[in-house]
């Protein structure tokens, strides 16, 4: 954990608090960073599913038994 001093836009912080349901600046920043990481993971998963990279879900011999 590191301590950093920075300037933030108070209006944006208040809007983010409202959206995230947070009370403190620290909680808001932490929750916002988590949201960015979750979004990146979702995008990565979606791209992997879209490309089928490393997946066998497009092969009938793999997917057919699942539907039985």
Image (cartoon, rainbow, N blue to C red):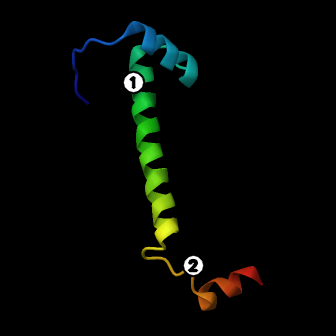
Position above or below: 34 against 40: above
Give residue 3's position: percent from left, percent from top.
22, 21
**First in sequence: mark 2 or mark 1?**
1
Q: Are marks 2 and 1 in contact (CB under 8 Å)?
A: no
Find the distance from the CA under tag 2 to the CA under tag 1. 38 Å
Q: Judging from the image, what secondary structure is the residue with disc 1 in?
A: helix
Local packing at callout 1 (Cα closer than 10 Å; few below 14, some 14-19, many 20+) is: some
Q: Position of residue 56 (x, y in %)?
A: 52, 81
Tell me, for residue 2, which label it has, or none.
none
| Nearer-the-camera pick, 15 or 65 | 15
Image vertical order of residue 7 relative to residue 38, above or below: above
Secondary-structure class at tag 2: loop
Circle 2 is placed at which residue position? 57
Q: Position of residue 6 (x, y in %)?
A: 24, 15
The answer to whether 40 is drawn above or below residue 14 in the figure is below
Give me the disc on residue 29: 1
Residue pictured at 43% horizontal, 57% vertical: 44
Q: Tell me the residue at 45%/29% (across/down).
A: 31
Q: Residue furthest right?
A: 68
Which quarter shows the N terminus? top left
| Relative to 19, 12 lies left or right | left
| Residue at the limit of the structure toward the top, as seen here | 10
- In the rendered image, the quadrant that contains the C terminus is bottom right
Q: Residues within 10 Å of mark 2 (few under 14, many from 20)?
A: few
- Residue 8 location, quadrant: top left
From this view, report whether residue 46 is shown above or below residue 3: below
């Amino acid at each position: 954990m590191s301590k950093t001093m920075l300037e933030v836009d108070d209006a944006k912080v208040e809007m983010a608090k409202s959206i995230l349901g947070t009370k403190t600046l620290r909680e808001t920043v932490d929750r916002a960073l988590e949201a960015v990481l979750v979004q990146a993971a979702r995008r990565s998963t979606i791209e992997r599913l879209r490309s089928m990279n490393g997946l066998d879900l497009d092969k009938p011999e793999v997917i057919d038994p699942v539907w039985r």
